[in-house]
Amino acid sequence: MAEARQEFPIETQLKKDIQDAQRNRDQLRLDTLRMALGSIHNLEVARTDRKHAEFGQPLTEADCIKVLEQEVKKRNQAIPLYKQGGRTDLAEKEQHEMEILQVYLQSSQMSDDELQALITQLIELHGKEFRKVMPLAAKETKGRADGGRVQRLVRELTQ
């Protein structure tokens, strides 16, 4: 039998916050956090399938963060669609869920100053060409900064 893996700090925090939400009877927060924890668990289970691209690879903290980023992205994409369809109630629900999840991503995100320093360093090493710097910056900041933010900064600094 496979031994139980160590829990990541982000999972421990999610479980603790789920208990707090239960005590406070905060249903939206409770549902959102359970969904997030479920998504992380689903990825872990998917990796036990031999057909899965990442079969047999252990789950990492970065994977947990990536799952949460995907959940935030789903909400981001759904909000304008709900507004377009006149369902402001659902748009607001998605907005609240997104805000709840973003708290967990904030701690792992790079500040603008850190990001700018990294991009400046890459420009010094590889020249001021956007096409050379952008892929490197994207690789370096994966999971720690929003791609749009990275692209905007690289564009500004390579002008």
Image: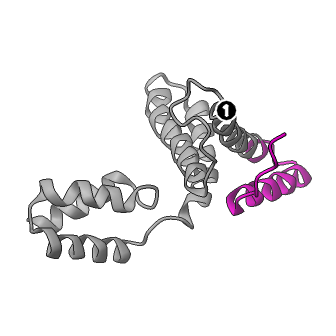
Please check the rendered image and state whether residue 18 is part of the magenta-colored stretch, yes or no.
yes
Give how far across and how far down residue 49 sits, in percent. Answer: 64, 27
Work out whether residue 104 or residue 67 is closer to the camera in this orientation and state it. 67
Specify the principal SS of the magenta part: helix
Which residue position holds label 1?
48
At a point 63% along the width and 48% down the height, the residue shown is: 59
From this view, report whether residue 34 is shown above or below residue 87: below
Please check the rendered image and state whether residue 122 is part of the magenta-colored stretch, yes or no.
no
From this view, report whether residue 115 is shown above or below residue 139: below
Q: Which residues are magenta?
A: 1-30
At a point 35% along the width and 77% down the height, the residue shown is: 113
Res 84 → quadrant: top left
Quadrant (top left/top right/bottom left/bottom right) for the C terminus:
bottom left
Give how far across and how far down residue 129 sits, in percent. Answer: 9, 61
Work out whether residue 8 or residue 33 is closer to the camera in this orientation and state it. 8
Give how far across and how far down residue 134 sits, in percent. Answer: 22, 56
Res 121 → quadrant: bottom left
What is the basis of the colouring in this image?
one colour
Give how far across and how far down residue 99 sits, in percent. Answer: 59, 52
Q: Residue furthest right?
A: 23
> Mark 1 is on which residue type?
Thr
Quadrant (top left/top right/bottom left/bottom right) for the N terminus:
top right
At a point 61% along the width and 60% down the height, the residue shown is: 103
In the rendered structure, the answer to whether residue 127 lies left or right of residue 32 reads left
From this view, report whether residue 39 is shown above or below residue 150: above
Res 2 → quadrant: top right
At a point 75% along the width and 57% down the height, the residue shown is: 7
